[in-house]
Image (cartoon, helix red, strand yellow):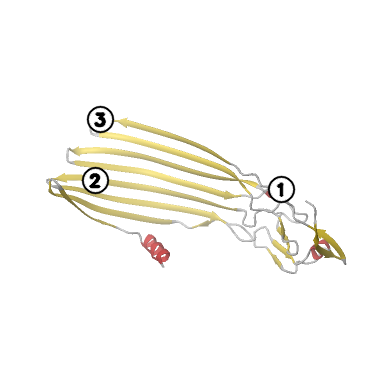
Amino acid sequence: AAAAPAKTVSVLGTAIPVGIYPVVAPSFLNTYNYVISSDYTISDKDQVRGRYISTKQVGLDTAAQLPIFFANQPTTAKVGTISEFHNFRPNLYNEIRLAFNRQNTDTPVPNFQFPGLDAFPNVVMRDLNLNIGPNPNGPQGRLQTTYQLVDNVSYTKGRHELKFGVDFRDLIAASTFIQRVRGDYEYNNLQRYLQDFVPDAVAQRNVGAKPYSGNNTAYYWFVNDNFRLRPNLTINLGLRSIDPNDALEQLTSEE
């Protein structure tokens, strides 16, 4: 685009006209899904069910200012369960389930190298309001996996329909992100950058991008009773546990 005559920057006393270079970023999202489902009846008292769901989405990360630094951003999710249902007696029923859930999100950066460096940093000229480099928040990634064991029991006795259950979860949350791992060098004006002077605004680079594991475990339980007082009146009574982390998160959000 043509430079706006009213806007200039000075380099060694020379006024250089600058203007807006319009960038129309492409926008797309490719999604791939598939599901596998299986049911198997072992006997009149036992049944096994299995489910597997996979989702992959690929879009374009356009957080960089210049198109050369745009990069594909993949996100994947997988869910798998296997359940066994058993009738001990007509009034006693049990379900046991094993499951896993995995989500993976990456913010990659293109494979460019700046002369003299092992990675391409973010180079900012403040007078131009221009950032030369990839997404300032990249690279980073998050891989979250949850393993789950659930057991539910249903028992009917007289006017009571009782249900009990426990839920154990092992959460594995690995993430990789260190701010300015590629380097952040900011100049107040274009002249200082062209003269290869030391950045006068910001000159920072952190060392290493080691994964951080925010692993945790959680367990829950519940007891429930549907008590039929009369044919047209049923009372539902129950107790359930609350994970301390969930309670704290809820309290914080309410504040």
Write down the residue under mark 1: 68
What's the amino acid at mark 2?
Val
Measuring from the top left, give residue 42's x and y in whole percent: 28, 30
Measuring from the top left, give residue 169's x and y in whole percent: 38, 51
What's the amino acid at mark 1?
Ile
**Where on the picture, by quarter, is residue 238?**
bottom left
Residue at (49, 37) in percent of width and height: 33
Q: Which disc is residue 43 wearing?
A: 3
What's the amino acid at mark 3?
Ser
Q: Residues within 10 Å of mark 2 (few under 14, many from 20)?
A: some
Residue 73 placement, left or right of 150: right
Q: Secondary structure at mark 1?
A: helix
Q: Nearer the viewer, residue 125 or 108?
A: 125
Q: Secondary structure at mark 3?
A: loop
Write down the residue under mark 2: 153
Mark toward the start of the polypeptide (3 vs 2): 3
Q: Residues within 10 Å of mark 3 (few under 14, many from 20)?
A: few
Residue at (75, 54) in percent of width and height: 114
**CB within 8 Å, label 1 to label 3:** no
Q: Residues within 10 Å of mark 1 (few under 14, many from 20)?
A: few
Residue 80 placement, left or right of 114: left
Measuring from the top left, give residue 70's x and y in whole percent: 67, 48
**Where on the picture, by quarter, is residue 52?**
top left
Of the two numbered discs 3 and 2 in the rendering, the one whose residue sits closer to the viewer: 2
